[in-house]
Image: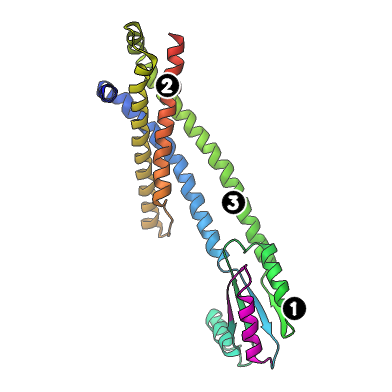
Amino acid sequence: MLAFRDAITAFKRAPLLSALSVTTIAFSLFAFGLFGLVWLNIRGALQKVEERVEIRAFIAEGTDIGQVALAANDISKYPEVQQADIVSKEQALERARRELGEFKDVFEAGFLPASIDVHLRPGFRDPLSVKKVASRMQEYDFVDDVRYGEEWIAQLYKLRNIAGVTGGILGLAFAVVAVIIIGATIRMAVMARSREISIMRLVGATDSFIRRPFLIEGFAKGVAGGMLALLLAWTSMFVIEKYLRVETIFFDRRLALSGVLFGAMIGLAGSAVSVGRHLRKI
């Protein structure tokens, strides 16, 4: 209880320095959070594109519909497959006219063959998995051709890998910079109270007694900075959505809480390291 009172007293005694510490933590985490939001939205956009990955097996003319239905049912049971739909000639014609409206007069009844359209499960949309399913579908006698945009899928998967690796490296760099800046700020706050620490040591206070208020103070500053950073990030995304008319993805509750806890842990660790170094010098 005494440690909490000392931490509050320290806040009141040096409000400007405390505000500087909280602001520094907030803006450091804000920069890291903005990068996280950009990466999160890029990943979301790529996932939406991946959802359009499908395999289309064109059915030979005159094939019995019962045979096609049995094959579609069999294909739907593949571990990689989420759904297998039979598309008749009429449905294929209607879809073509709908998706390619400017060329709708070009398409004629019977021009497009029936097909089995296969949608894959998440995690099985990479080039190797898609090719594997397509090869199995090609084995049916009544399948004339199988199309799935091999080059497009390969480029999409390559782009996703590049985004993942780049995001990981830059994210780590942002995190390290944030930790360094926050650590330096907290160390300055501790150094500003070095005389107080020396006096406490002289009157017989133990190291744990001296550390406790600083740890609580660092933790509180980290929480405050994390919450402020979260507010700044939300405001930024709100402004982008409102004025640029861009739909964005924000952190879910788990990620938002993790960000605040990350700030708290940095504040706690920074205070522990800074006070520990100072105590060793006394």
Q: In the rendered image, which quarter is residue 149 located in?
A: bottom right
Residue wearing tag 3? 163
Taking the spot 69% from the left edge, 72% from the top edge, the residue there is 134
Is residue 281 shown above or below 175?
above
Taking the spot 57% from the left edge, 69% from the top edge, the residue there is 52
Is residue 82 shown above or below 243?
below
Whole-Å distance between the Cαs marked 1 and 2? 68 Å
Q: Mark 3 or 2 closer to N-term?
A: 3
Q: Report the amino acid beneath label 3.
A: Ala
Residue 139 shows which numbered tag?
1
Residue 82 highlighted magenta (yes or no): yes
Residue 67 % position (x, y): 66, 88
Q: Name the foreground residue: 74 vs 159.
A: 74
Quarter of the image that includes the C terminus: top left
Q: Is residue 113 visible?
A: no
Under circle 3, the secondary element is helix
Whole-Å distance between the Cαs marked 1 and 3? 35 Å
- Residues packed near mark 2 inside 10 Å, few (<14), some (14 to 19) or many (20 plus): many
Q: Report the amino acid beneath label 2.
A: Arg
Q: What range is drawn magenta here?
A: 63-85
Residue wearing tag 2? 187
Q: Name the foreground residue: 154 vs 142.
A: 142
Q: Name the foreground residue: 9 vs 121.
A: 121
Left or right, residue 92 beside residue 38: right
